[in-house]
């Protein structure tokens, strides 16, 4: 059995761009910065991963309309690998093709990610498993 599923929450690194296929289907692209904070030898450090996102159809148009640089969002989707050859060399890149995009606050707050996934829940931060 194969499973290709990913959930990512982070902040947009730039405003979404939108393109249209020749038959009029909307495609929106943007990247999300995902931070991981950890302690190494008593020093707090942060690693940042920049994840490219591709969104199709009506969701693409909504992303262009409602998201902007710095906005928090969550993406549920699948990983896609693009491969190509240029001047005899093989290249590849990974991106996330969105199945669902959940819009969050304009700027991150301590509970912003929790609020995306549990908007009506009155859970305290101690009850959140992440």
Image (spheres, rainbow, N blue to C red):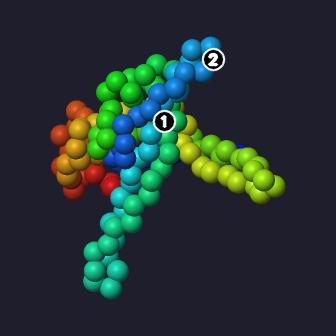
Give the residue at the far front of this rendering: 87
Q: Image point 56% across, 18% down: which residue?
A: 25
C-alpha gap between disc 1 and disc 2: 17 Å
**Secondary element type, mark 2:** loop
**Horizontal and vertical percent position of residue 68:** 31, 36
Check disc 1: other Cα within 10 Å, few if <14, some if 14-19, many if 20+: some
Rendered view: 23 above or below 76: above
Q: Secondary structure at mark 1?
A: strand
Tell me residue 3's x, y (percent).
63, 45
**Lateral position of residue 122 relative to residue 35, left or right:** left
Q: Does residue 121 appear in the picture of this structure?
A: yes
**Other residues around mark 2 within 10 Å, as few (<14) / some (14–19) / many (≥20):** few
Q: Is residue 38 left or right of residue 3?
A: left
Do the residues bearing badges 1 and 2 touch, measured as CB atoms within 8 Å?
no
Spot occupied by residue 52 in the image (x, y as percentages of width and height) = 50, 45
Q: Is residue 72 visible?
A: no
Residue 109 or residue 91, whichever sits in front: 91
Depth check, mark 1 against mark 2: the one in front is 2
Q: Residue at x 22, y 56 (%)?
A: 126
Residue 34 image-quadrant placement: bottom left
Residue under circle 1?
29
Q: Earlier in the sequence, mark 1 or mark 2?
A: 2
Locate residue 66: give its quadrant. Answer: top left
Q: Vertically, is 90 above or below 79?
A: below
Question: Residue placed at 54% from the left, 42% from the top?
Answer: 96
Q: Which residue is mark 2?
A: 22
């Amino acid at each position: 059995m194969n499973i290709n599923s990913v959930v990512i929450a982070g902040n947009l690194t730039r405003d979404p761009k939108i393109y249209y296929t020749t038959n009029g289907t909307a495609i929106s692209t943007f990247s999300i910065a995902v931070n991981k904070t950890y302690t190494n030898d008593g020093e707090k450090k942060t690693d940042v991963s920049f994840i490219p996102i591709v969104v199709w159809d009506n969701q693409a148009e909504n992303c262009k309309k409602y998201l902007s640089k710095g906005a928090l969002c969550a993406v549920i989707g699948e990983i896609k690998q693009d491969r190509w050859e240029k001047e005899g060399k093989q290249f590849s890149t990974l991106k996330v093709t969105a199945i669902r995009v959940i819009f969050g606050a304009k700027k991150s707050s301590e509970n912003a990610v929790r609020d995306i996934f549990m908007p009506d829940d009155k859970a305290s931060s101690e009850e959140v498993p992440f």
